[in-house]
Amino acid sequence: MAVKEKTQFIVFDVEGVLIPKNMFFFQVGRALGFFALMQILLCRLLYEAGIYSLANSLKRIFGKMRGQKIENLQNIFDKIPATPMLQSLFRQIKEKNYRIALISSSLPTIIVKRFADRLGADYAYGIDDCVNTAGEITGKVGGEVIKVNGRMKILQKILTKEGLTLHDCTVVAKDQNTLCLFTTAVKKVGYNPNFIIRIKSDYVVMGKLESILPIIGGERVKRSFPSVNDFVRENIHAAGIVMPIMAHIIGVLPVAIFIGVLSIVYFTSEFARLCGKNLPLISTVTRHAASPSELYGFAAAPLFYALGILFTLLVFPYPVNAAAIAIFTLGDSAASVFGGLLGIRLPFNKGKTLEGTLSGFIFAFLASSLFIAPWIAAIGAVIAMFVEYLPVPVNDNILIPIVTATALTLLI
């Protein structure tokens, strides 16, 4: 009797991996009206800040949806752009005879199942008890996915049915919702992950989701070269070095006002883009500079970038602010551009590479040497690259310039 070949099992978190994070709630909130949208976004913000539990946040959000037809919510979900090339990715996974499960802690199970059917996934789990027999949202939420370790219980039931073990599993996730699945037995892949998942991951994938294919197949991960979007984004990032120079020439206040106005315009543009509208020029630049994960959600990185530069300009004097911003803009850009050429991953933070860190240090040192003594510039560059390497919850675009400027203030 022939022995059946064991298939591997892959678990995908839905939000943030397959669809833009919080996009479903944003679009539902839009349909319910401005005040409902603000309340829903506030609930998500309080949850992500750790103030609300997942269950408490979802109860408040689905309470706002009470009485809505599930068909209307399904139509809203169907219009949300999924990760590019998603159907092609799933087809390639299925060709390798892998089984797939989609697990969501934000979407009703009925919506997740329809999404799974469209992609060819084998299992789908979401929120239960939120739809009544009339097809209306009840305002209640339940199911294993919102319980502590609930996702692990779901996975173990599936594996028992499939005759597999945790060692046969790969889990692809972005944030802490899936943290209970990140055990030592499974292969853990963080996709554009937050700092907790980044620390726990065996592999970190930034950018294109298709990059997980060699990982789940146990193949050697190929070197990644910057895309056109990468070059555009990092050139914009590096251009920030002119801000402290302009501030030194015409004054800090005019430059600060310019950054503030540009940030407001950008925020308006992103909000309009999520609503299906475009602002001339700004939306075009965003499309050519955003990463794949940002392109279909709210690209917040430029706002953090502007805030980091603005705070550094206003709080720290020249030449400290100029050197810190030079280190941040040139060093961080170089680290991103050259970070995938060899793929020598650093320990503890799998999303960073040796070549990226060294390139970032060199460019940061050279740029800051224009404003401060070389030995101080070298120390500042080392500090910046160390902060950039650490997987911390504060956004790099804010943390790097502020920490670097603080250190330089103590040295000068």
Image: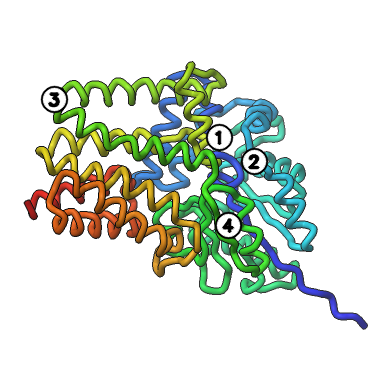
Badge 1 amino acid: Tyr
Nearer to us: label 2 or label 3: 3
Report the coloring of the rendering.
rainbow
Q: Quadrant of residue 321?
A: top left
* Residue marked by disc 4: 172
The residue depicted at 55 percent of the width and 55 percent of the height is 224
User: As rendered, which of 179 and 303 lies closer to the eye?
Assistant: 303
* Residue marked by disc 1: 296
Q: Which residue sits furthest right?
A: 1
Q: Earlier in the sequence, mark 3 or mark 1?
A: 3
* Residue marked by disc 2: 84
Mark 2 secondary-structure assignment: loop
Badge 3 amino acid: Gly
Mark 4 secondary-structure assignment: strand
Mark 3 secondary-structure assignment: loop
Task: Give how far apart the Cα atoms at labels 2 and 3 are.
Answer: 44 Å
Q: Is residue 86 visible?
A: yes
The residue depicted at 45 percent of the width and 58 percent of the height is 351
Residue 250 in the image: above or below residue 322: above
Q: Earlier in the sequence, mark 2 or mark 3?
A: 2
The residue depicted at 68 percent of the width and 28 percent of the height is 75
Q: Are marks 2 and 1 in contact (CB under 8 Å)?
A: yes
Q: Earlier in the sequence, mark 4 or mark 1?
A: 4
Residue 400 in the image: above or below residue 72: below
Task: Give how far apart the Cα atoms at labels 3 and 4 are.
Answer: 48 Å
Q: Residues within 10 Å of mark 2 (few under 14, many from 20)?
A: some
Mark 1 secondary-structure assignment: loop
Task: Give how far apart the Cα atoms at labels 2 and 1 are.
Answer: 9 Å
Badge 4 amino acid: Val
* Residue marked by disc 3: 251
Q: Are marks 3 and 4 in contact (CB under 8 Å)?
A: no
